[in-house]
Image (spheres, helix red, strand yellow):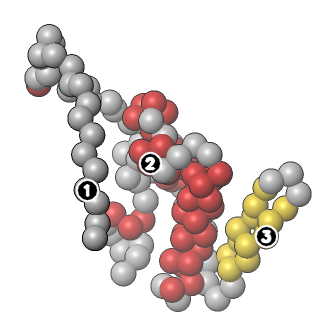
């Protein structure tokens, strides 16, 4: 038979309020800088693993979309990794909204990429 264990903890007294004025809205990458764990799970090895998967996912998407037939993942000395595919690559032309290269836009702007609209991925 399972034993149910209940612990009682003290709660903070109602000495301060929590309302709409206590909500912070961060813009751009500020949220990632302040709380990277919310985006990659952790800032430890598991977070690094997640970032590697994100890079690999881009190559895999190219292959699954029929734009690449080779994806290479190599573990390198010095805790480095290389992911290479023979797909289309990341566009480098100037992006009309951000006025910088599409590569810089994709790598430095949250929610920027070919999967959010257009014909980049179907």
Question: Which quarter of the rendering shows the N terminus?
Answer: bottom left
Q: Which of these two is toward me, 67 or 81?
A: 81
Q: Disc 1 designates what residue? A: 4
Question: Where, by quadrant of the figure, is residue 60 drawn?
Answer: bottom right
Q: For the residue carrying disc 3, how many other residues have a C-alpha within 10 Å: few (<14), some (14-19), or many (20+)?
A: few
Considering only order in the chain, which callout, 1 or 2, is on the residue closer to the N terminus?
A: 1
User: Is residue 64 placed above or below 41 in the rendered structure?
Assistant: below
Give me the residue at 38% from left, 52% from top.
Answer: 111
Question: Marks 3 and 1, Cα distance to the nearest angstrom?
Answer: 49 Å
Q: Earlier in the sequence, mark 3 or mark 1?
A: 1
Judged from this view, the residue extending furthest toward the front is: 1
Q: Residues within 10 Å of mark 2 (few under 14, many from 20)?
A: some
Residue 119, image x, y percentages: 36, 74
- Counting residues from the start of the chain, the first of labels 2 and 3 encountered is 2
Q: Are marks 3 and 1 in contact (CB under 8 Å)?
A: no
Real-space Cα separation, disc 2 to disc 1, in angstroms? 35 Å
The mark lying in front, picked from 2 and 3, is 2
Q: Nearer the viewer, mark 3 or mark 1?
A: 1
Give the quadrant of residue 80: bottom right
Mark 3 highlights which residue? 74
Q: Is residue 94 visible?
A: no
**Location of residue 107 in the rendering, given as x and y in whole percent from the top left corner:** 53, 49
How far apart marks 2 and 3 lie (CA) works out to 25 Å
Q: Quadrant of the C terminus?
A: bottom left
């Amino acid at each position: 038979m399972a034993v149910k264990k209940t612990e009682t903890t003290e709660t903070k007294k109602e000495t301060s309020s929590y309302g709409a004025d206590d909500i912070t809205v961060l813009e751009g990458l500020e949220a990632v800088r302040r709380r990277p764990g919310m985006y990659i799970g952790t800032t430890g090895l598991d977070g690094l693993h997640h970032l590697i998967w994100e890079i690999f996912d881009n190559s895999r998407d190219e292959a699954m979309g029929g734009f690449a037939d080779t994806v290479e993942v190599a573990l390198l000395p010095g805790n480095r990794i290389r992911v290479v595919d023979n797909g289309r690559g990341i566009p480098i032309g100037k992006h009309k909204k951000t006025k910088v290269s599409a590569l810089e836009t994709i790598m430095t702007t949250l929610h920027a990429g070919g999967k959010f609209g257009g014909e980049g991925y179907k």
